[in-house]
Amino acid sequence: MEVKNAKNWNDCRCDFSDSNYRCGSCLRRDPTPKHCPPTTAKQWKIALLLPDVITDPTWNGLAYQAVPRLVAEGIADKFSYTEQVAIPDAVRIASGYAAEGYDLIIQHGSQFVDTT
């Protein structure tokens, strides 16, 4: 699948009932898209809870670097994060983001399984 010309995943609302559907086909610059009529999709507010610091060059740092790309690509309009989240605090912090209207709250770590 080649989607190098993609500008925004929000423009893709494909009909999955079409047997010829191929993921990403509507993101190509086709003047007459066959599967995906343009829509105006809601932009998301995304929160990220990390067990460690964002400067961690592996697990936490990679997650921190990935989510802002969703904002840059127009998928999300707001991104917030909390680092060094202790397991006992995860529910309180996630609930706070939910109360603020966040659409997606990512608890980035297997230690958060029981709190999710």
Image (cartoon, helix red, strand yellow):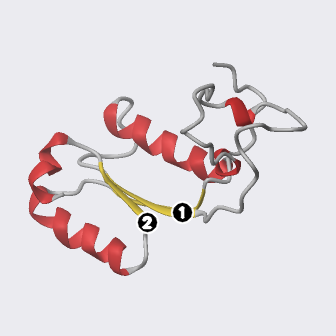
Taking 76 as reference, is 83 left or right?
left
Taking 56 as reference, is 24 left or right?
right
How many labels were placed on the picture? 2
Residue occupying the point 23% across, 48% down: 51
Q: State the image coordinates of residue 47 (x, y, percent, origin top left).
A: 41, 60
What quarter of the picture does the N terminus occupy?
top right
Q: Is residue 111 above or below residue 30?
A: below
Q: Which mark is residue 103?
A: 2
Q: Is residue 60 above or below residue 99?
A: above
Along the line of sight, the residue nearer the viewer: 30 or 64:
30
Q: Residues within 10 Å of mark 2 (few under 14, many from 20)?
A: some
Taking 18 as reference, is 49 left or right?
left
Choose top left, top right, bottom left or bottom right for residue 114: bottom left
Choose top left, top right, bottom left or bottom right for residue 20: top right
Along the line of sight, the residue nearer the viewer: 101 or 60:
101
Residue type, mark 2 in image: Asp
Q: Is residue 112 above or below residue 28?
A: below
Alpha carbon separation for disc pair 2 and 1:
6 Å
Q: State the image coordinates of residue 107 (x, y, percent, origin top left).
A: 27, 52
Residue at the right extreme, as displayed: 31
Q: Which mark is residue 44?
A: 1
Callout 1: helix, strand or loop? Answer: strand
Residue type, mark 1 in image: Trp
Residue occupying the point 13% across, 45% down: 111
Q: Are marks 2 and 1 in contact (CB under 8 Å)?
A: yes
Q: State the image coordinates of residue 36 (x, y, percent, origin top left).
A: 71, 44
